[in-house]
Image: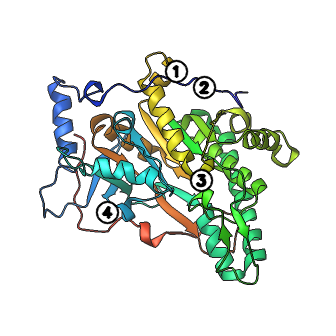
Amino acid sequence: GVMGQRLNGSAPPPPASQRGQPQRGRKAALALTILTAASACTVARGEPIHSTTFRNLSAGGPQPTVAFHRCYNFQDSYAGAYLVSTDLFLRVNFRDMNALEWASREVWTLTMGFERGRVAGCVFKTIDRKAFYILHLSGSEHGFVRRVGYAKGMQFTTTITQTALHEVNNRHLRPEGLLRPWLPNVLSLVPFYGGSGVVSLNPEDMHKPKFDAKVGNSHTLASPELKVMQLLAVVCSNLEYFETVIVGVCRQEDLVAIEKTVNSEAVGFLCDRCRSGFRVKVFNCADGPLYLPYVLLRWAQDNFHNPHSEWFKRFSGVYYTEADNVLRMDGVTTEGMNEVMKQQRFRCYFAPQRMERRTHTKLDEPFEELSVSGQNACAQGLEYTESFL
């Protein structure tokens, strides 16, 4: 296995003036395709273009399409996860911020042109909400606890975590699982803090739990044991689509807890890929886990820039996710996103639909009866379609 493997650090990135620039002089046929795709992004002010559709070129027979909505503000685009080309990822300035959302907001700010001299780009979410989405476990937890109280709410959260882990693991064992991963050129990054951030908790008054400021706004009530199980569900789901997952932790004890769990009887059903197909990188976080997402993201950027980090050169995309987002997407969508990232690699990225479980029936079917987090629903507007021709 590769558990606990430390990856080498790297030299500082080169100055911005020396970093990769868009290639010029491409073939005419490809240039036409780029222009076609770009028309969905370079929209004059006031034009009502809200969505775009891309054809799946490799499929035989009738050409299926994958359709996306363009998100018009950060709240719409947010999911706690995103898929971005390496070219765009390397241009983002990830500063230490005391909230998880900034790991996404920094990408949004750069892409949407809030930088001098930059042309506005695009953030897409799929119109079909089940084509590319995450099951947000802590969001589901908050809803359970509000509706049925602390004890039952956490019981439901534990159940849906366990059934989600079983489901994503079983997907690796199906015949079509032999074709995975669908996006082997994408590196998945997952920051993980295994400690409890709860300082005080009154089960009779769940409106006022107190959390340690060092965990920022990561306000889950999950126990350290449950958090590791949720991490495994996230990692296992990512490994269905991406070749490599790196989990970043701040504490040696988190690495130990992960290793102990994957070797326990509780998850004896895990396939080899979900058990040992990911890497754990331990960082020295002087300020605790508060800035862990930004430490992990900057570390990845440094390794991409380091000419001696050959291992990183295989990846043309990055998928970043918080450690409670179980991923699902379909094959047509992955092909469409991969094609757009190749052609719009400096200007567009994708965020999954952020789905939560609002009901506590059929918890043995964790990916059913899901609802989009309302504040993160990409705006529904007038339809406009473009196809790769």
Q: Earlier in the sequence, mark 1 or mark 3?
A: 1
231 relative to 240 in the view: left or right: right
Nearer to us: label 3 or label 2: 2
Q: Earlier in the sequence, mark 3 or mark 4?
A: 4
Please provide percent x and percent y for residue 247: 62, 40
| Residue for point 62% across, 68% down | 140
Dot 3: few (<14), some (14–19), or many (≥20) neighbours within 10 Å?
Answer: many
Which residue lies under the disc numbered 3?
326
Please provide percent x and percent y for residue 174: 66, 42
What is the three-letter code of the residue carrying label 2? Leu
| Residue for point 70% across, 70% down | 362
Which residue lies under the disc numbered 2?
7
**Cα distance in 3D space between marks 1 and 4:** 35 Å
Is residue 199 among what the camera can see? yes
CB-based contact (under 8 Å), mark 2 and mark 1: yes
Check the picture and name the quadrant holding the C terminus: top left
